Amino acid sequence: MKKYLAEMIGTMVLVLMGCGTAVSLGCNPVGADLSTVVGTAMAFGLSVIAMAYTIGGISGCHINPAITLGVFLSKRMSAKDALMYIIFQVIGGLLGAAILYALVTSAGTDFALAGAGLGSNDLQSGVSVAGGLIAEIVFTCVFVLVVLGATASDNESTGKFAGLAIGLSLILVHLVCIRYTGTSVNPARSFGPALFAQLAGGPATALSNLWIFIVGPFAGAVLASCIWKVIGNNK
């Protein structure tokens, strides 16, 4: 149970800090102020790094159902643990979004609307459903592949720096993908904010497009596990 609770807390922190930064900075991926994009990308990456060195020794710090699926398909964990990880990650995402919702609504509806819909994911201007889905599949694949490689038992080049490598790769993924979907690559990160964005008066498409940020990351994780089976030692 400790590792499940660790996953819940880690995901809660990821959503609160990552999405919270997007809200506080008023992140607009297609706007002129690119510093908000960089700040949001760094917040998500730094959250992963912080949690990796906090709960990594307890649960491995997946805090992402896509990572859990990739690890399971790579035969590094049982089906029971994988299912429980995902359940508690979703709960953690909901808790993080609930805290953020309480904060932004206390500051007024206008602030909530200006704050990127509680940091929820959505298709950005000019991006089609197919384009968004491709972006989530590709960048989740890259991210999960980094995780599988950095945490491989025979990878002596990373060792205790795996958390740093994973966090920095998430920053890179955000810097590229945020223009297209706001960057999910994590169903638990998307589910909670999408739900509470509706309560905060955010964009209606936050929920209607949510399936993209569930299907895309899971498909990307499957693809990453297949690639790792070919190039890795599967340890």
Image (cartoon, grey):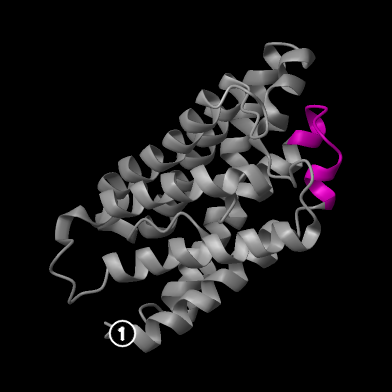
66 and 114: which is toward the camera? 114
Q: Is residue 194 visible?
A: yes
80 and 203: which is toward the camera? 203
Find the residue positioned furthest to the top: 107
Q: Which span is picked out in magenta? A: 197-208
**Which element type, helix, strand or loop, lies under badge 1?**
loop
Residue 204 among magenta residues: yes
The quadrant the C terminus occupies is bottom left
x 77%, y 63%: residue: 130
**Image coordinates for residue 216, horizontal then vertical, percent:** 65, 65
Q: Which quadrant would residue 57 be assigned to in this image?
A: bottom left
Q: Which quadrant would residue 160 be assigned to in this image?
A: bottom left
Residue 91 among magenta residues: no
The quadrant the N terminus occupies is bottom left
Q: Which quadrant would residue 193 be assigned to in this image?
A: top right
**Image coordinates for residue 192, horizontal then vertical, percent:** 66, 44
Up/down of 129 relative to 11, above or below: below
**Image coordinates for residue 33, horizontal then vertical, percent:** 59, 22
Number of other residues with Cα within 10 Å of mark 1, as a class: few under 14, some 14 to 19, many 20 or more: some
Q: Is residue 1 left or right of residue 199?
A: left
x 66%, y 23%: residue: 102
Up/down of 127 relative to 69, above or below: above
x 78%, y 41%: residue: 125
Amino acid type, label 1:
Asn
For disc 1, the marked residue is 234
Find the residue positioned furthest to the left: 156
Q: Is residue 149 left or right of residue 198?
A: left
Q: Is residue 65 visible?
A: no
Find the residue positioned furthest to the bottom: 230
85 and 177: which is toward the camera? 177
Up/down of 33 relative to 86, above or below: above
x 75%, y 35%: residue: 197
